[in-house]
Amino acid sequence: MSKAPYIAAGVVAAGAALAVLVILPAETGWDPTGVGESLGLTQIAEPTNLELERGMARMAEQDVLTLSQTPLPASEGVTDVWEYELLPFESVEFKYTMPEGQPMTFHWEGTGTLAYDMHAHPFAGGEEVTESYGVDEAQAMNGVYTPAFTGIHGWFWENRSMDNVTLRLETSGAMTRSTVYTSAGEQDRPLEGAAEGPQGSVEGHQMQSPDAG
């Protein structure tokens, strides 16, 4: 009797074990066996988060994010609803262009738990000046977000499960445009009734700018 089927099955099993024990902890931080943490692999996926440190310093000085257990009344301005289905281990990033000091009420919910990073940065600077205001896992979140500076504000979500997860985001406030970032590229989304451009200042960002000392 040929041993080929047994060899093939062994290769498949070894590949699956490698993915669970090594690849997923290193790439996504998902470590169901604990082996990834013991080998230091989860630190590759989740190194020291300087963006979160900047965001926590911001929130210690001013009200940026107020969370609620239940959905909140709408903020003045435009309203927006967006849905997206995340495949297993797929991620998506969604950003609004918003002016400094103008609040946005939001509610997002998934059909399953999602890893998320709520963050913002001015129009220039990217990762060097990005501030994160929450990095965790949840199935839903409600709150009011008040930008500390004019720029790009939103979320990164990642589905770390083996099931598809549908995400629904509902917002209201002074958003002027939205942009979706996926593996396929960047997609602009117009917002009906929104102003042509944000009226605000990036000065509030200087607390965390590279030149602030």
Image (tube, grey):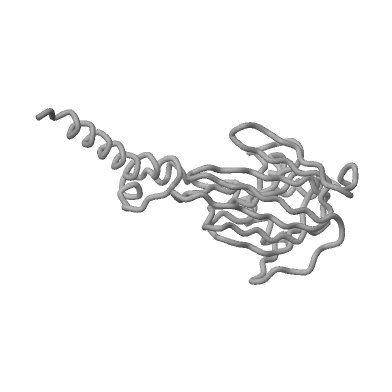
Q: Pick out the residue farthest to the front.
A: 1
User: Residue 203, position in %: x, y?
Assistant: 81, 46
Give the quadrant of the C terminus.
top right
Q: Is residue 98 above or below residue 124?
A: below
The answer to which of 129 and 84 lies nearer the viewer is 84
In the image, farthest residue toward the left: 1
Query: Could you tell me residue 133's position as x and y percent?
Result: 64, 55
The image quarter in which residue 95 lies: top right
- Taking the image as shown, residue 144 lies to the left or right of residue 191, namely left
- For the view shown, which residue lies furthest in the bottom direction? 69
Residue under the point 62% across and 37% down? 182
Q: Is residue 38 left or right of residue 114?
A: left
Numbered-mark total: 0
Residue 207 in the figure: left or right of residue 128: right
Residue 69 x/y as whole percent: 64, 71
* Picture quarter with the N terminus: top left
Q: Residue at x 69, y 41 (%)?
A: 180
The one nearer the camera, 162 or 138, is 162
* Picture residue at 40% right of the left edge, 41% below the top: 26
Q: Residue 157: image x %, image y %?
A: 58, 48
Q: Nearer the viewer, residue 3 or 199?
A: 3
Tell me the residue at 56%/60% (across/down): 139
Closer to the camera in the image, 9 or 170: 9
Q: Would residue 36 appear left or right of 102 to someone viewing this image?
A: left
